[in-house]
Image (tube, helix red, strand yellow):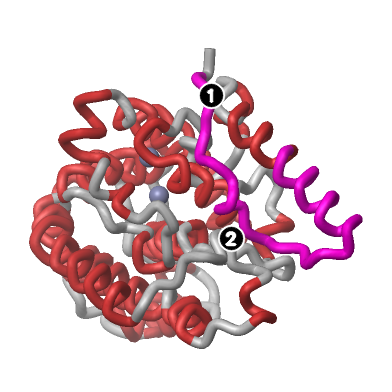
């Protein structure tokens, strides 16, 4: 809740005119308690999870030859029922597990200093904070994910996320309830280390959610804007991790590729990619049809040592 009754008081306190965004924020948040603003996060989580996979859903349902060349595992087709089941399971986990976590984490959010006040952060401040959040989450998430591929971690928890050997957008957050909690910790770590405005905090979880949906979409579009992000893994990169499945020793990172490169856990993927490229070149030389899929190849992987 903002300590101003009106625009005049807010501008007097800040000693300047408010920007348009700040006026909107004042109108929206002035009379809302901070805990209510914090609880918006679970609404955004469900809202964006319901909207962001829809384009991929329509693409998957209307499969054509033009679309198929972008599908990573082109022999796999998910039905509407498959997607609906996944959606229902994830929303149930959001309501039963993430909702209570959001409610109970409010004192923690206050403690670390997530602010709701004016002024709003600048574009530059938001960008750098979000970049730090992505890097912290990516690095810690890498190690947690790698640990989840140990015997106990996989059998008890992580096998649920790997039920989809050819992932789809809705399967991004599909996981055992405890994995949602475990992997939620690295996501909270960035805002705890570099606390910012609550709008940045909202945006962080929305962007991370959209990124996970794209990464699990099963499609690798040549025009995707994320291709211009340096060291970005993307859909093909993470798809390979699901394709290998249980014994995967490759591509543990959720967003960027640098951790897998540094710790040698991308060797299997790089080998697989080079073999796939050679196969495609041979097919092209023989006048055959070039496919974007690698699921005609056996799943294999290397240990990182
Ligand atoms: Zn995994
Ligand atoms: Zn995954």
What residue lies at 52% left-to-right and 33% top-to-bottom? 300
**Along the line of sight, which residue is nearer the eye, 58 or 178?**
58
Question: Was residue 286 drawn as part of the magenta stretch in this picture?
Answer: yes
Is 23 situated above or below 269?
below
Q: Which residue is mark 1?
A: 302
Specify the quadrant of the image occupied by residue 127: bottom right
Question: Was residue 25 drawn as part of the magenta stretch in this picture?
Answer: no
Q: Is residue 108 left or right of residue 172?
A: left
Say whether marks 2 and 1 touch (CB < 8 Å).
no
**Along the line of sight, which residue is nearer the eye, 296 or 271?**
296
Main SS category, magenta section: loop
What residue lies at 50% left-to-right and 69% top-to-bottom? 15
Q: Is residue 255 left or right of residue 169?
A: right
Q: Position of residue 296 (x, y in %)?
A: 58, 52
Classify 10 Å Cα crowding around label 2: few (below 14), some (14-19), many (20 and above): many
Q: Which residue is mark 2?
A: 72
Is 273 situated above or below 148?
below
Is 184 situated above or below 49?
above
Classify 10 Å Cα crowding around label 1: few (below 14), some (14-19), many (20 and above): some
């Amino acid at each position: 809740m903002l300590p101003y009754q009106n625009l005049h008081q807010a501008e007097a306190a800040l000693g300047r005119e408010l920007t348009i965004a700040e006026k909107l924020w004042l109108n929206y948040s002035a009379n809302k308690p901070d805990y209510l603003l914090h609880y918006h996060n679970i609404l955004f989580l469900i809202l964006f999870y319901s909207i962001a996979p829809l384009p991929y859903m329509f693409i998957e349902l209307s499969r054509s030859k033009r679309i198929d060349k972008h599908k990573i595992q082109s022999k796999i087709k998910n039905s509407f029922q498959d997607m609906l089941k996944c959606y229902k399971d994830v929303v149930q986990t959001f309501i039963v597990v993430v909702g209570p976590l959001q409610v109970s984490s409010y004192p923690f959010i206050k403690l670390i200093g997530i602010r709701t006040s004016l002024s709003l952060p600048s574009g530059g401040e938001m960008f750098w904070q979000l970049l730090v959040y992505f890097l912290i989450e990516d690095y810690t998430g890498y190690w947690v994910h790698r640990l989840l591929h140990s015997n106990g971690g996989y059998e008890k928890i992580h096998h649920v996320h790997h039920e989809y050997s050819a992932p789809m957008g809705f399967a991004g957050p599909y996981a055992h309830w405890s994995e949602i909690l475990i992997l939620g910790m690295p996501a909270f770590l960035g805002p705890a280390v570099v606390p910012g405005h609550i709008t940045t905090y909202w945006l962080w979880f929305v962007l991370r959610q959209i990124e996970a949906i794209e990464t699990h979409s099963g499609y690798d579009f040549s025009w995707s804007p994320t291709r211009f992000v340096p060291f970005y893994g993307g859909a093909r990169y993470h798809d390979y991790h699901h394709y290998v499945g249980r014994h995967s020793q490759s591509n543990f990172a959720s967003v960027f590729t640098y951790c897998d490169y540094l710790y040698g856990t991308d060797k299997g993927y790089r080998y697989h990619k080079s073999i796939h490229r050679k196969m495609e070149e041979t097919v092209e030389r023989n006048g055959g049809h070039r496919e974007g899929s690698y699921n005609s190849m056996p799943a294999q992987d290397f240990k990182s040592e």
